[in-house]
Image (spheres, helix red, strand yellow):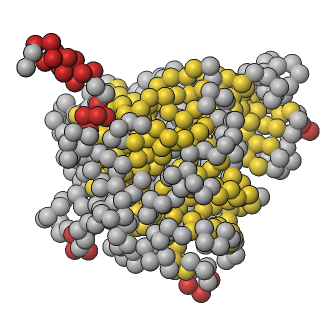
Amino acid sequence: MQLKYRIGLFLIWLFMPFMFVFAQSDDAPSGVIAYIMPTGVTGGGELRLFNVVDASTQRLSPPNESPQDIAPHFSPDGAWIAFISDDQLAFIRPTGEDFIATDIENPLHITWAWDSTQVAFLTQRGDDYVINIYSLDTRENRTYAPPLNNLNSHSMPSWSVDGTFITYSTHIEAGTNNDILRVSSNFDPETIINLSNSDDISEFSASVSPNGLFISYKSETDDIWVMNITGDNPRNLTEGRLSLGASDTVHQWSPDSTRVMIPDAGRGIAIIDILTGEISDVEGENPTWSPDGRWVAYTRFKENREGIAYSDLYIAPANNPRNGRVALENVSSAGLSWQPDPSLTFEPIGLATLTPSATDTPSVPQSQVTGVLSPAEMIDWYFDGFAGTEITLSLNSDDFDAYLQLYAPNGDLLTENDDYLNSTNSLITITLTTDGIYRVVVSAYYGDMQGNYSLTLAGIESELRETTAGGIFVATATPTFTPTLRPSPTPTFTATPTSPPTLTPTPTLGLDRGQCPPNLPPRLVINGRGRVLPGGTSIIYEQPTPDSATLGEIPGGVSFTVLEGPVCADNRIWWQVDYRNIIGWVIEGASGEYLLEPLRR
């Protein structure tokens, strides 16, 4: 072979994009992924397909100069894509044919029946939510409210594999805990069964596994659980080892039903093995499984250009999601869906496999306590620690912005944590360096906040207790444990007689109740976290008026930090927020509906 020819082949190989390297191996990913491409217009997004093998793309959006597409969902047979187009439910074939438009606005948590003939989803009706079922065969939408009262955004539906029933979460009566329920797919009230039936704890976000044997769900103590489809044998998979975000996060099962992938968890995305409890996580959003379950795809934010957020699409081995590579640049964070392959089959998982004995799969040691925090209170907990032991402390509350501090046996502050990732919970993971009594301080970041909390210590055979006494070590008299002061904004709860705090960022706008939407009291708080309701999009304005310049947009389900507000004008509630270094004004509510919600409050 001539030298020039060899050099030419080498250079072609050297600069060949990695997606072509995927195509050279039988172990490489394949298929197509539905994604959203920014159009360069604020709020605009175009539904497209990405071919994993040859890196080609194809537009699927119906003819529209300014499409606004989000949230693609492939049907289980791969023959349809459900998505939201211009705020309405729509369907299209992956070939771009047979586009179906509906007039159903703002559907939440779209989930396909396993026979790919219908979808279930939530819609909001006033202050309540209802479950809908739309049939592709009849083009009919059926809405069910009674007897499914008390539904909320956490009540996401999930189909049984045979299509005979739907699971969802709700509280049976006002003031009671959320439970996981099942009901026949025609919503006969006589068929409602409470599967979790817990008096002490609330459960959310139920999801049925592809093999039809299991249901995964989240508890209010921020753990992921799995139980049999009949509701028996509940098992805590995470045991305080994973920080979670919103309660209405969709659980995505692997095609072989051995793993659950959770967005808004860990570093951003967490994959949990239901047989071993092993957790792997990666920074990213919008995860989706490959048809064979050996790969995952996700997006990761890259930059903001002229008010438009751009992300990159990554593909990674499912057993090592942090080893991902960029497959496609400059996509939107408005959703991904990998086309399933219905020809693939998987080995069944025996029920006995999910019930290991204490000697087969020992659980991670943990101690959990609950309590009530009063305004301006700091609560101490103690535990015996041992040098060389890695422990995890997690402080969770739906009522206040949690703040957690850990002190060494000599009284020195070891570490502290406020908001872990996009939540208002706190999490500390640390390897202890000495034997002795460690002190944990529970408080709220803002002193006027109060409410219930749970504190979990994991990774060590030790119990949390309220005093230094009662353990194997003896506390010394010195030094005195004194929590260090932490920097924080000037607290709004401390009144000053000469200069009362103002909520008015400009002389002409302010919290004029006459300008606020009726029956929509502001719910966000300054320096707190909020998010756009799933399925929606929030435009960021330069000033609190829709006539001002637009700076960008926040996708549905994505969170932000509240800086100033509220401001009411023209029956709209405005807040100034910080979203990935874009600072501007967003609308919390208008026309009788909330567009934003406080995160974990």
- Indicate the position of residue 357 as horizontal and vertical percent values: 17, 69
Quadrant location of residue 334?
Answer: top right
Relative height, residue 295 to residue 327 (above, below): below
At x 7%, y 20%, the residue is 1
User: Is residue 278 in view?
Assistant: yes
Residue closest to the far front: 2
Q: Residue furthest bottom?
A: 190
Q: Is residue 573 left or right of residue 278?
A: right
Residue 424 in the image: above or below residue 352: above
Q: Is residue 225 visible?
A: no
On the image, the x and y values in percent for residue 262 come to 41, 50
Residue sitting at the far left:
1
Q: Along the line of sight, which residue is nearer the eye, 148 or 290?
A: 290
Residue closest to the eye, 549 or 435: 549
**Could you say where residue 452 lies in the image, as x and y percent from the top left?**
53, 51
Q: Is 277 or 214 nearer to us in this picture?
A: 214
